[in-house]
Amino acid sequence: MKKKLLIYITILAVQFSVAQNNSSFGEGEWFKFRMSYSGWLKAGNATLSVNETKLEGRDVYHVTGKGWTSGMIKWFFKVKDRYESYFDIKTLLPYKFIRDIDEGGHTKNLEIKFDQSNNKAYVVDKKNNTNKVFDTSPNIQDMVSTYYYLRNKLDVNKLKVGDEVRVDMFFDEENYGFKLQYLGEETINTDFGDIETLKFRPYVMAGRVFKEEESLTLWVTKDKNKLPLRIKADLRVGSLRADLEAFKGLKHPFRIVLKN
């Protein structure tokens, strides 16, 4: 198992969910995913939760993402990751992002504050005791807020098969141009039954972990919730799959074509 992969897969899965013009999520929403390596070996779990709070007097959503290894994998590669994002309830633009990870002994503890008015990111590296300032693109997103931004702002009815979607994201100390391609609709079998889905291909950086830029495929529900149901990754060694295992606090009905 490559370091960082578990939490990356989870966050990537939820980043690419998309929605109609009305809000598709709210306070109390919670997801749980299970990971499997090469189709059979349990690799770990991840969760995402949404709460409303205030940050410096502003009404924000506070989203917390956690990822950890389990089963046999944890005996030779232990992961314990935590990601947090505070973003505006109306604009969905982030004000604060936290990344606190321990991945096989590789650790990071970053806190990023976004000045959306002046297009700046203030990065505090708590592990190395450093402070840096970076220029960002207008309306920049963080790794977690991107999911919720796309979920509410992107109108899938206007997408055609082959269309590409791009979002400016800031991650760690770098501006990143996130891109995914719409592949159409597909009905898949899940733990919950047969579900109508929207299928996407996120582009990733080929190299040490992924075979090529088109190594990922993901499926999200075709209902108003746009739940991330599944993601598959072709790795340089083996493959990884993430499946939605449990959820609660949905804002809209969960639509099942045929129950198991």
Image (cartoon, rainbow, N blue to C red):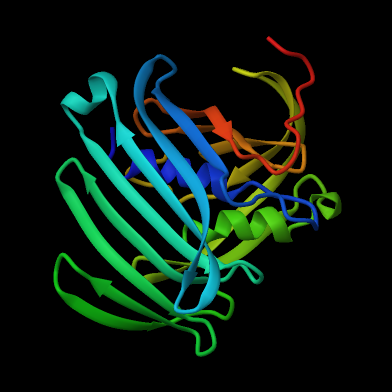
> In the picture provided, is 71 more to the left or to the right than 142?
left
Q: Residue furthest bottom?
A: 118
Residue at left 67%, top 49%?
181
For the residue pair 81 and 58, the one nearer the viewer reads as 58
Q: Residue at x 73, y 31 (%)?
A: 254
**Residue 259 shows up from this direction:** yes
Which of the 4 quarters of the picture holds residue 228?
top right
Check the image and report above or below for 137 versus 200. below
Residue 42: image location, x then y, percent = 36, 20
Task: Locate the N terminus by quadrant.
Answer: top left
Q: Is residue 1 left or right of residue 138?
A: left
Total marks drawn?
Answer: 0
Residue 213 can be seen, yes or no: no
Image position, residue 245 (x, y; %): 52, 25
Tell me what residue is drawn at x 27 percent, y 55 percent: 100
Q: Position of residue 122 (x, y in %)?
A: 35, 80
- Location of residue 35 in the rendering, given as x and y in whole percent from the top left corner: 42, 27
- Identify the residue at the far right of this view: 157
Rendered residue at 17%/24% (across/down):
75
Q: Quadrant of residue 158?
A: bottom right
Q: Quadrant of the C terminus?
A: top right
Report whether 21 appears left or right of 18: right
- 230 with respect to 252 (left or right): left
